[in-house]
Image (spheres, helix red, strand yellow):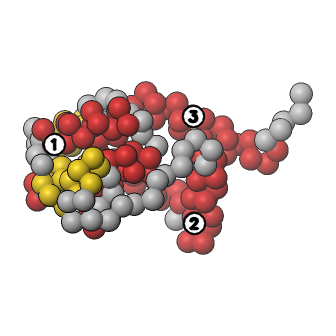
Amino acid sequence: MPNWMGRYHSLMEALVLHGNTSARYINTKHEYAQDIFLTFQEGQVLEYIIEHESDDDSMIRISERLGIPQSSFSKYTKVLCGYDLVAKYQMVNNRKNIILKPTEKGKKVYEEHIRTSARISFAPFFKALEPIPDEYLELMAQALTALDSDMHTPAPPEKSPLVKI
């Protein structure tokens, strides 16, 4: 049988292994900070909310951008709000869409996590990428986005003043 992947075979093998390994790890709770236990996806949601704090993206838009089903995203949000890492807001002119913002505690916990375990966990991955020029890294990111493109389409952001709920 011919190898339809051609020269991309080893990369596809690595992506399959990564996907399967991630699937096993993704819903396991780990100590994110002292007495705060989050899954990998809950941590990803917190990171996204902090990195995009000024965007005023709705929960629906964030779940689409991260490729997380809305029902799962709501559960992750509930956990983050329960730890007081994230707060919910509504737009003045649209109370249907919920906007998430990091709390000061959330920012502090995230910074602590980055200083400790996150940098250690990703160090071997980043070291393996060092020889690759920046423009190629961007091309790799574009290739992964193209691979996922038919799986979800993010909605455009909505802008309006916010009201905490």
Q: Residues within 10 Å of mark 2 (few under 14, many from 20)?
A: few
Amino acid on which the number 2 mark rests in the picture: Glu
Q: Are the two marked residues, 3 and 1, in contact with CB atoms closer than 8 angstroms? A: no
Amino acid on which the number 3 mark rests in the picture: Leu
Mark earlier in primary sequence (1, 2): 1
Q: Viewer-nearest of labels 3 and 1?
A: 1
Q: Locate residue 146, reporting x and y percent.
A: 64, 52
Q: Residue at 39%, 60% (x, y): give it.
A: 157
Q: Viewer-nearest of labels 3 and 2?
A: 2
Q: Which mark is residue 138?
A: 2
Mark earlier in primary sequence (3, 2): 3
Q: Are the two marked residues, 1 and 2, in contact with CB atoms closer than 8 angstroms? A: no
How far apart are labels 3 and 1 at the CA level? 33 Å
Disc 3: which residue = 17
- Badge 1 marks a residue whose secondary structure is helix
Mark earlier in primary sequence (3, 1): 3
- Badge 2 marks a residue whose secondary structure is helix
Q: Locate residue 145, reporting x and y percent.
A: 58, 53
Amino acid on which the number 1 mark rests in the picture: Cys
Residue 137 placement: quadrant:
bottom right
Q: Locate residue 138, reporting x and y percent.
A: 57, 66
Residue 105 lies, with reference to residue 79, above or below; the image says: below
How far apart are labels 3 and 2 at the CA level? 22 Å
Disc 1: which residue = 81
Residue 39 placement: quadrant:
top left
Q: Residues within 10 Å of mark 3 (few under 14, many from 20)?
A: few
Q: Is residue 128 left or right of residue 165?
A: right
Residue 141 lies, with reference to residue 71, above or below; the image says: below
Q: Residue at 59%, 46% (x, y): give it.
A: 148
Q: Is residue 74 visible?
A: yes
Q: Is residue 135 left or right of residue 36?
A: right
Q: Is residue 116 left or right of residue 26?
A: left
